[in-house]
Image (cartoon, rainbow, N blue to C red):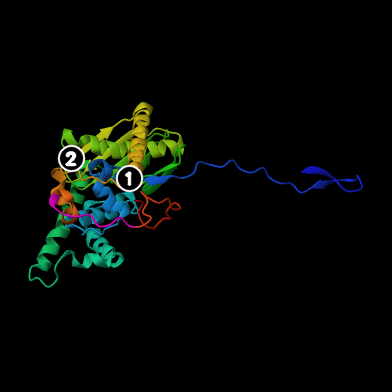
Amino acid sequence: MRTATGPGGEQHQAASVPDPEPAGPVRRGALSPSRASDFMQCPLLYRFRVLDRIPEAPSPAAVRGTVVHAVLERLFDLPPAERTAPAARAMVAGQWESLREREPQLAGLFDETSPTAAAELASWLRSAEELLERYFELEDPTRLQPAERELRVEALLEDGLVLRGIVDRLDVAPGGELRVVDYKTGRAPSELFEAKALFQMRFYALVIWRLRGVVPRQLQLVYLGSGDVLRHTPDEAQLLATERKVRAVWAAIERATAAGDWRPSPGKLCKWCDHQVRCPAFGGTPPPRPPGAVPLPVVAPAAAGGPDPA
C-alpha cells in the first residue's frame, strides 16, 4: 500500500499496485533433438520438414516404432505382476487400431486390395510383438515404477531459445537420482554413429537439468532391434558443451533462414529420404520458400495429448 496526498492535504492510502514482473527473454524459436539432428545431417532436409512442412510417407518401420512405444507406455498402467510379455503382445493389435483411427492416412500402409495384404499385416504385427518380447530380456518391468512416461519437457534458455522434446521414460530413485530412458526399435549403432544417439540423450538431460536443477544420474538407450542397452553418465561439463552445440546449431539455422541458403548434404542416409525428387543433389529443384517461413515458430507449450513437439 502507498500513502497519497489529496487536494486538501489529507492523506489516504492508495490501492496497492504490484511492481511489474521483470520481462523474460524474448523467445527466438524452439528446437528439439530431432530437428537439430535434421539440420546437422542436411540443412535442406531441415528446410523441407520445418519450413516447407512437406508431408513424408509413413514407413512400416516408423509406424511399428510408434505402436511399440505406445505399448511400452501403457504396460506400466498394469499392476506390476501383470506386466508380462503375453500382456504386451496382446496390446499390439489394439494400439495399431487406435493409431489408425487417429491417423487415417495410415490406412494405406498396407494395400488392402492385395491378396497378400492380410499376411503382410500379420507379419508386421508379429514383428512388433518380437520387439516387445526382446524388451523383457533387457528389463524386468515388474520391478520398475517410472515417475513419468512420454514426458513433455521444455526449457527456455537465457538467450530466448526454447529447447523441447518428449522423454520416453523418467525413473526416479529413492535418493532422488534421475534416469532418462529412451526406447529404440532399431539396432544399436556402430561407434561411428553412437555420438548422434548420445547427442539426443544429452539434449534431454540438458533440458531436465535446466528445469529441475539436477543432472540426471544416468542416460539409458534401449535398442530393441538388437537387444543392446547403451548407458551413459553425463556431467555438467558435457551438458554445457551440449548447450553450446545446440546454440551454435540454432545460430546456423537463423543464418540459413536469413540468407535462404539451404544446401543439401548428400550421404548414406539419402537412400531413405522422401525428398530426392526435389533435391538438387539428385537433379531436383526445391519448391519456392513459403512466404513468411521462420525456422520454427514458438507456440505455447503443448498440452498433454496434443501434437508432438517438432
Q: Residue at x 44, y 51 (%)?
A: 301
Q: Label 2 belongs to which residue?
A: 188
Point out the image quarter for the N terminus: top right
Query: Quick one: which residue is furthest to the left in this view?
Result: 115
- Circle 2: element type: loop
Q: Label 1 belongs to which residue?
A: 259
Which of the marked residues, 1 or 2, is nearer the chain's N terminus? 2
Q: Position of residue 115 (x, y in %)?
A: 7, 71
Between residues 9 and 89, which one lies in front from this camera angle? 9
Report whether 2 appears left or right of 118: right
| Alpha carbon distance from label 1 to label 2 | 37 Å
Q: Position of residue 119 (x, y in %)?
A: 10, 65
Q: Which residues are magenta?
A: 282-290
Q: Position of residue 156 (x, y in %)?
A: 45, 41
Q: Residue at x 11, y 67 (%)?
A: 117
Instruction: Please tell me whether the stretch drawn in magenta is mainly helix, strand or loop.
Output: loop
Between residues 100 and 41, which one lies in front from this camera angle? 41
Q: Is residue 129 visible?
A: no
How many numbered callouts?
Answer: 2
Q: Quadrant of residue 237?
A: top left
Q: Is residue 90 magenta?
A: no
- Circle 1: element type: helix
Q: Is residue 297 visible?
A: yes
Packing grade of label 2 (10 A; few <14, some 14-19, many >=20) is many
Query: Quick one: which residue is furthest to the bottom in this view?
Result: 113
Q: Is residue 283 magenta?
A: yes
Residue type at mark 1?
Ala
Residue type at mark 2?
Ala
Query: Depth-wise, is mark 1 or mark 2 nearer the camera?
Result: 1
